[in-house]
Image (cartoon, grey):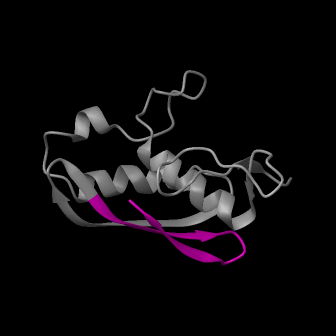
Amino acid sequence: MNRITLAYNPDNWGIMADSSGNLAIASGHDRIAQDVASAAKMIKGEALYSADRGVSWPQILGQPLGRLAEQEIRVAGLNIPGCVSCEPETTSFRNREQRGVIRVTDDIGEQSNVPL
């Protein structure tokens, strides 16, 4: 099955229009990478019909970040159909903002780095 999703602008996380003025669509590896990024940003319980998806940010915040957050992000990413490897790495945490990268590999071996 070919899965698709709305394409997000990576600068502001808003939806985009394609060259014809229609809603832009992401598919294939772009869809997988974008869905992993969305899963990393989602608070567990936020999606009403998939309450088990996302990251337990309320339980993680206030604790030393790093391995705990990375493990939650890894689990959330691996729940995305087509994602076979999800390796988050926190590079900094300043002013309550976590920075890093998520290395994503899809089921055909394509890899990308998704900003965290």
Q: Determine if the magenta segment contains residue 55.
A: no
The answer to whether residue 92 is left or right of residue 15 is: left
Vertical order, 11 against 43 (above or below): below
* Residue 15 picture location, percent across and down: 62, 44
Residue closer to the observer: 72 or 46: 46
Q: Main secondary structure of the magenta part?
A: strand
The answer to whether residue 91 is left or right of residue 105 is: left
- For image coordinates 67% across by 57% down, the residue present is 31
Give the residue furthest to the top: 48
* Residue 71 picture location, percent across and down: 35, 55
In the picture, which quadrant includes the C terminus?
Answer: bottom left
Residue closer to the observer: 80 or 38: 38
In the rendered structure, which segment of residues is drawn in magenta? Answer: 99-116
Place residue 90 in its image quadrant: bottom left
Place residue 100 in its image quadrant: bottom left
- For image coordinates 66% across by 52% down, the residue present is 7
Vertical order, 46 against 31 (above or below): above
* Numbered disc total: 0
* Residue 40 picture location, percent across and down: 44, 49
